[in-house]
Structures are given as structure tokens and as C-alpha cells.
Image (cartoon, rainbow, N blue to C red):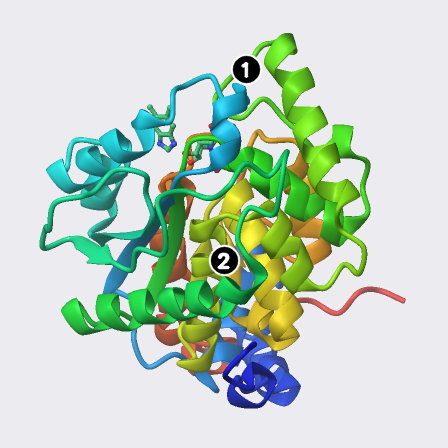
Amino acid sequence: MITRDWRAEIAPIDAAVAAAGRERIDNLTKPQGSLGKIETLAVRLCAIAGGIPAHAYERRTILIGAADHGVAEDGVSAYPPEVTAQMVGGFLGEFAAINAFARAVRAEVYVADFGVRAKLAAHPRLIDVHCGYGTANLARRAAIPRHDLGYVLAAGIAAYDEAAERAPFDVLALGEMGIANTTAAAAIVAAFTGKPVRAVVGRGTGIDDARLAVKIAAVEKALARIEDFTWEQIASEAGGYEIVGLAGAILSAARARIPVVLDGYIVAAAALIAGAIAPQALDYCVAAHRSQEPGHALALEALGLEPLFDLDLRLGEASGAALALPLVEAAARMVREMHTFAEAGVATKEPDPT
Ligand SMILES: O=C(O)c1ccc[n+]([C@@H]2O[C@H](COP(=O)([O-])O)[C@@H](O)[C@H]2O)c1
Ligand SMILES: Cc1cc2nc[nH]c2cc1C
């Protein structure tokens, strides 16, 4: 089913390189540890780059995976499914939140259609990797036939390649758009973490208690069909096209040794799939933020990733990942441009009195 051997193709990061990065950062002219998570991020960038990064990650691309979800028909979202295609129109028309944020952080925006229900007109910023007109309803049957998973993963690889060809980048931010996709993400997170369904199902776009009860029941039905807990069975039962597609994009970024900035809950579900395929792919991931969706913190814990910030976001569409891009630049500039105490001739810390 998996046509590539991702575990062989993705280089694990070198612990000695990470340690050398940490050593240099500890010797820069600032009290040790005073730049907190920016230091941890800089160590990760050094590990990914195989040394001090050669640039400041100024070529930035935001890739938004879009798709529809059959479970939307049960009323698990506060919005109707047409909004998926309409918001893709917004991203391409450049008037959505992500476009405003992308302008603020100087990033290119591309949208990958992995499985939107409506037919979308060609557009220079649209990448057509369409796998189907929305998934099947996960409350009733497998969202994606198992034999299609390799095809959907390959669509993610193709989307990555196409984005890289249209605008070469040093860092990739991933986001998504798909009405009802927090239901699919919740099923994936529950399956991978073993956490109770109620802990991973949140209010998504802002649902009331009645819709929340339907959403919990839908996730329970999908979970009840999962027996072997392989990524294939989890992804097939829960979907969606954009989640599996984004897992493919994460694997591609890791293979190319490009840092990949993850947005919110749904992208974390994609990362769980990528990590099940090749655990070392997660070394190339940076968690931008912790979303308001309660299961996101649990997913990040399972991924072993600490978010850079928490701004109470729950929009998706890569909004949080976009805001992390200047932090990636700042971390790279810190390690590239700051001098060490020895280079600067600044006195080092006083020894502690014993
Ligand atoms: O990124 C998040 O953590 C996040 C949390 C809640 C909602 N969303 C967005 O809202 C949509 C899914 O919400 P829902 O209620 O339709 O499942 C989808 O388009 C996501 O981009 C995103
Ligand atoms: C309006 C709207 C915009 C979005 N962007 C990402 N998910 C979204 C969901 C809705 C409903």
C-alpha cells in the first residue's frame, strides 16, 4: 500500500548536531535560557539544517489543504458544508484571515484541493490534487476506502512538489479548510492517543450542546469500527482527504529537510498519521500554537511537540502557523547573527558562591 519506504527516506536528525547548536546558543550574549522557546526552536532549526542554518527562512509558503467531510450531513458543524468551497474562494480571492496574516508575515499562500465537494475553477494559487468529492460519512462507514489511502498520500506529495515548484521555500506552514473536519480529527486523535472521546471532541466552529452530542456519537461510531489501530485503518475510518494529504506533505517536507510549521487541531491529526508512517518526520515539525480545541493539547503531547504560543485561536486555515513564521526567522537570526560571549568580549556569568 505505501509505495515508498519513508522510514528509509527521511534522515533522522543528528543528536550531536542538536547538542552543538544548544552549546552555541548557551554561549550567545544573553543569560542562558533567557530566550525560552525561541532557543528550543533554534536548536531544532540547527538539527534540521545539520548545523547553523544557512539563511533566515525568509522564503515562506503557506499550504492550505481543503476537503469536504460526509459527516457534515449529520449537523456536526455550526456551518453548512458549502462553506468549504466558499472559503477556498476567499483564500484565492485573498480576502480571508489567512491572506491578511500572510501579507503581515510575507508568505505565499497556496490551496490544495484534496477533496472539495464542489468543482473548483482553475486558479494560479490552487493546486488540483482532487481525490474525491468529499469523504463518506464516518458515522456510517469508512470515510476513505482503504485502497485509496496510498493515492491520497501521493496527492499530498504532489501538492508539496507543486508548491515547491511554483515558489521555492525554506519553511512550509500547513493549514486546512474543511467543514466538519474537527470530527474526523477527533476520531484520529482518540484512536492514536487512547483518550476518551469526550476529551478530544470540542466545539469546532462553535456548536451547541445538541450538535456536540451528535458529534460525540459520530466519533464513537467510527472508533467502534477500528480494530487494529494501524494508521491505515484509522485514516480510512476517519478520513479526511485533506488530513491524509497533509500527512503526505509533512513526510515530503521532512524528506527535503524543510521545517514544517503545524497549525491547529486538524493538522496535528495529520502529523499523528505522518508520525505513524515515519516517526522521525516529527523531528522536522514545529507546533505553532495550542488551539482552543481541547483535544489539541492532547494531540501535541502525543506528538512530543510543545506549541510556541497560545492566542486562543480556533480558526484553522493556517492562521496560527502563519503567525509562527516570524518566530522561525527570529530564532534563525538569533543563532546566525548573535555573537558569543567570547566573540563579543562580554564578561560571562559570575560563578555561584559555594
Ligand atoms: O485549527 C483548529 O484548531 C480549528 C479548530 C476549530 C475549527 N477549525 C476550522 O473550522 C472548520 C472545522 O470546524 P467544524 O466545526 O466544521 O468541524 C475547519 O475549516 C477548520 O479549519 C480549526
Ligand atoms: C467562515 C469559516 C472560515 C474558516 N476558516 C477555516 N475554517 C473555517 C470555518 C468557517 C465556518
Q: Is residue 347 visible?
A: no
Distance (Cα) linking label 1 and label 2: 25 Å
Left/right placement of residue 50 relative to residue 227 reads: left
What residue lies at 76% left-to-right and 28% top-to-bottom?
Answer: 198
Q: Which residue is mark 2?
A: 244
Q: Height in image: 223 above or below 33? A: above
Left/right placement of residue 350 relative to residue 269 reads: right
Assign a secondary structure to mark 2.
Answer: helix
Q: Nearer the viewer, residue 204 or 27?
A: 204
Circle 1 crowding by C-alpha within 10 Å: few under 14, some 14–19, many from 20: some
Q: Amino acid at mark 2?
A: Val
What residue lies at 64% left-to-right and 9% top-to-bottom?
Answer: 210
Indicate the position of residue 220 as horizontal and vertical percent values.
Answer: 75, 34
Earlier-in-chain disc, 1 versus 2: 1
Between circles 1 and 2, the one closer to the viewer is: 2
Q: Which residue is mark 1?
A: 207
Q: Is residue 68 visible?
A: yes
What residue lies at 69% left-to-right and 40% top-to-bottom?
Answer: 222
Q: State yes or no: Cβ of the residue under disc 1 lies below 8 Å from any atom of ligand 1.
A: yes
What residue lies at 60% left-to-right and 47% top-to-bottom?
Answer: 142
Assign a secondary structure to mark 1.
Answer: loop
Give the quadrant of residue 333: bottom left
Indicate the position of residue 335 as horizontal and vertical percent values.
Answer: 43, 72
